[in-house]
Image: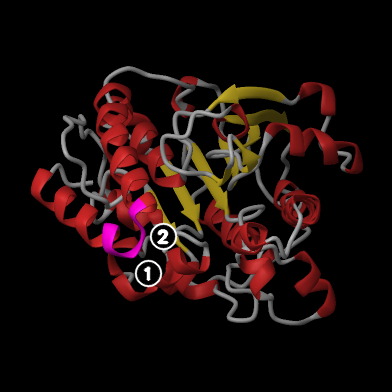
Amino acid sequence: MPVDFTQWVDEFRENFCDSPKRAIMQALWCSYLGLWFTVTSRFTFGQKIYERDWDALILLDACRSDALREVAPEYDFLDQSEIESVWSVGSGSLEFMCKNFTYEYEDQINETVYTAANGFLNRAFVEHEYAPSVAIPFGWPRYNVVRADDFKELTNVWDSRYSEQLKNVPPWEMTDAAISAGRRNPDASRYIFHFTQPHIPHISEAVEEERSVTEKEADPWKYIRRGDLSYEVAYERYLDNLRIVLDNVETLLENLDVDTAVISADHGEAFGDWRINGHPTAFPHPNVKKVPWIEVTAEDRNTRQPEPIPEEVNNCKSISESTVQQQLEDLGYI
């Protein structure tokens, strides 16, 4: 997020030629981002994860609190009445990472194993990008984010476990990576396992029908804007995406040896809230900023023995920029 008035003006002019209305909205949004990050990088608005007690934190990308409560009765390991709703420090993965993983918590981070299928790991901890890459006209964000080497282990499984058919890392692959990471690091104090679901693409029907995801499943927002898809259908697919990841989280909990496991999210998801879809950076709507938080039981019963992939371990610094770009494109960010 470069603070560059000249670049901001140049981007405005370029966008204005394509769409004057969109250019004005983009320019105003970038100005707002400058103010937002100047303030929120210094004062906490939301719950920082290291301020809570947990040994393993299972993050479900874009999971709303109300969505988890809705499907909780379908799962024995979830008690609907125990699901808290807390304010996240971010409304997107990159903002979540940049505000949680700071040198204020360096000692805890040094003992944290973080395994994820998320290109923003590289953006935050390798490339040291703070928030979106658009230019802002002014702002003084306080950058205090740790580096990849500050983690006990930092692994991005996108390169090694990607499904071309699903345009994503399937939750069962992420589960296998998480189980392997836990068993590989029995002495770690903290584990974070960051799944991509229920974030788009919505893969549940494609998995059931053994086919590739459709364009509507990959980018529902485009079809909603066109009037070719209803919010009701998109939300049901979102819930099914949540179910498919929870099915696999259940397997993880049977193969993880920790005292306190927590299921939460980095941010939620908007379905037309304030006329917004998805989860724009610095978007304060409760359906995006409030996330679930629930303690669950975990015990390694050795019900699954995944095949390790040695080359993926601690690989963030070796992942190519093209891989990161592909991931962010498949997740709808580019």
Please check the rendered image and state whether residue 301 is part of the magenta-colored stretch, yes or no.
Answer: no
11 on left or right of 188: left
Dot 2 and dot 1 residues touching (CB under 8 Å)? yes
Is disc 1 surrounded by few (<14), some (14 to 19) or many (20+) residues within 10 Å?
some
| Front residue (pair 226, 114) | 226
Residue at 73% across, 33% down: 296
> Could one spot residue 260 in this view of the protein?
no
Residue at the disc numbered 2: 119
Q: Position of residue 97 (x, y in %)?
A: 39, 41
Please check the rendered image and state whether residue 19 is part of the magenta-colored stretch, yes or no.
Answer: yes
Q: Position of residue 299 (x, y in %)?
A: 73, 42
What kind of element bears circle 1?
Answer: helix
Front position among marks 2 and 1: 1
* Region in magenta: 16-20
Q: Which mark is residue 170?
A: none
What kind of element bears circle 2?
Answer: loop
| Front residue (pair 241, 153) | 241
| Front residue (pair 51, 38) | 38
Relative to 148, residue 158 above or below: below
147 on left or right of 55: left
- Marks 2 and 1, how far apart at CA: 8 Å
Relative to 318, residue 286 above or below: above
277 on left or right of 151: right
Residue at 84% across, 41% down: 71
**Identity of the residue furthest to the top in this view:** 43
Residue at the disc numbered 1: 325
Q: Amino acid at mark 1?
A: Gln
Please tell me whether the stretch drawn in magenta is mainly helix, strand or loop: helix
Is disc 2 surrounded by few (<14), some (14 to 19) or many (20+) residues within 10 Å?
many
